Image: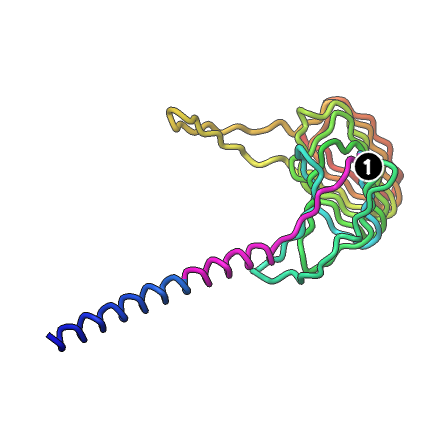
Amino acid sequence: MKTSRYIHLTMLVFIFGATLTLFINAKNHEEKSLKKSKANSKYLKLPLFSVIVAQENTKINISKSISNIVSCYAPNNEVIPENYSFDNFLVKNDTLFVTKTDEKYDTHISVENVKSIIGLENSKVNLSRFYADSLQIDLTKSRLTGHLKADSINYFSLNAKKQSYVFIYRPARVIKIDNVTKKQTVIIENANLKNATINLKDKTKLWMAKPKNVTIKTDSLSSYNLNN
């Protein structure tokens, strides 16, 4: 009887210890996962603005959204410091000034109603299916890449100078899946802007799909390729 009690007690201790260990491990794993996801990205909600100025040596990605948010992502599961600050993103007089970006991280700006983008010397701006009813882009010795949602842009204006580089590529195929039939439909988005005014100076290069209506001015040192 006494031996039986010892065995029973030992089993209870073992079960309790195993349960406690599993609980602690699960809790630690959950905390590490939450801490890890938070550490790999940070974001800040911004007030309204309609102009973005990418100042010298900055690198940003811009996409359309229902709110204004700047996000920072660390590649390869690296950790963003707890004291990381968004002080380099300042909204003043309806304009977002991006004064500095960290090359170690990817900086994404989601915008609600931006109509003008300005890229200053050695800045790099990438657009992700971006659009605005009227969109004006001014570049000075800077680089603009990405693609536009052409059907949603009524008027496009580009002024680029001092060896700027512009490459607006055709959008990738979009695959839509019917919720009921699960049938896939491949849609190729239109890449041709409706109306555009383009001005190139000082060894600037441009590649994009040819707009339906376009007025282009260029000096003898710049080049462009407008594909159908």
Above or below for 67 versus 98 = above
Residue 113 percent coordinates (x, y)? 74, 31
- Is 84 left or right of 159, judged from the image as shown? left
Q: Please tell me which residue is depicted at 36% across the width and 65% down the height of the picture.
A: 20
Q: Position of residue 121 (x, y in %)?
A: 85, 51
Instruction: Give whichever of 24, 80 is nearer the camera.
Output: 24
Is residue 188 left or right of 142 when viewed as pictured? left
The quarter of the rendered structure image containing the N terminus is: bottom left
Q: Which residues are magenta?
A: 26-49
Question: Is 30 within the magenta?
Answer: yes
Looking at this rendering, what residue extends furthest in the bottom direction? 3
Any magenta on residue 45? yes
Relative image position of residue 56 (x, y in whole percent): 84, 52
Toward which corner of the image does residue 95 lie, by quadrant? Answer: top right
Q: Which residue is mark 1?
A: 51
Local SS, label 1: strand
